[in-house]
Amino acid sequence: MPALITSPPVISAASLSKPLHSLSKAALPLFKPICPFPKTARSISVYKRPMNNLFNRLGYGSRSQQDPSSAAIAEGPDDDVPSPGQQFAQFGAGCFWGLELACQRVPGVTKTEVGYSHGFVHNPIYEDVCTGMTGHNEVVRVQYDPKECSFENLLDVFWKRHDPTTLNRQGNDVGTQYRSGIYFYTDEQEKLARESLEKQQKILNKKIVTEILPAKKFYRAEEYHQQYLAKGGSMGRRQSAEKGCNDPIRCYG
């Protein structure tokens, strides 16, 4: 019987230019439990930004297209100013959707935004960050009234929302954009963050890998990411952002 000969698979150039995403996300269920550490499953955006644009900004494109000041801007301080009498806090704890909703519910929090920070490319978008090549972390920037909400309260929410012992990973979301981080705006915030980490380390059995660094340039994420779970996500099932709400946060794409 003659042997069957099959042709090797053809790999197109287009297939090599697609942004990288967590390979496990496609197999995730729509809903996942909140305990012990909540995790979020997200659908992958259909839009794919041309990779050559990102390569140019990373310094691999033609010399005329490079932006030598890109890294300097991205790695500079967050120069946004909070409203009068308010303060900023910034956290990275895996997917920013669930953490933002948790912060929205804290009395004294007056505004939340999700975005990208601690990278080295100016003006990144979601598809850029998903490649893992820009160094950015998914973060939540919280504006709060210190007379009604202490920084310690926000730290408590931060620790409860994720597993700080997994490096560059929260559940099935894998990548440097999901790393655990506390990004401080004042010396007092730094002091409280380090004391809080030491306290948490005594509770947990594994080493905490949370980074504690000065807050850097904050790039607001696309509008569809903002207050994503409160608006219902792709399922159209809104979750309460009312102050003091203790409803379990359901994370889905």
Image: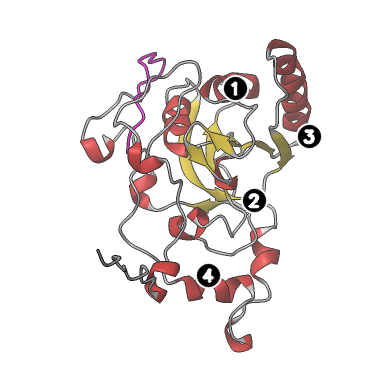
**Cβ–Cβ below 8 Å for labels 2 and 1?**
no
Q: Nearer the viewer, residue 132 or 161?
A: 132
Task: Report x, y in % for residue 252.
Answer: 33, 33
* Residue annotated with mark 1: 159
Q: Which circle's residue, 3 or 1, is located before the other in the chain?
A: 1
Q: Which residue is pictured at 27% across the width and 67% down the height? A: 2
- Quarter where residue 203 is shown: top right
Q: Is residue 53 above or below residue 201?
A: below
- What's the mark number on residue 187? 3
Q: Nearer the viewer, mark 4 or mark 2?
A: 4
Task: Report x, y in % for residue 69.
Answer: 67, 72
Q: Which circle's residue, 2 or 1, is located before the other in the chain?
A: 2
Q: Which residue is pictured at 72% across the width and 27% down the height? A: 193
Q: Which circle's residue, 3 or 2, is located before the other in the chain?
A: 2
Residue kind at label 1, given as amino acid type: Trp
Residue at the top extreme, as displayed: 203
Q: Which circle's residue, 4 or 2, is located before the other in the chain?
A: 4
Q: Dot 3, how many residues are within 10 Å of its Cα: few (below 14), some (14-19), or many (20+)?
A: few
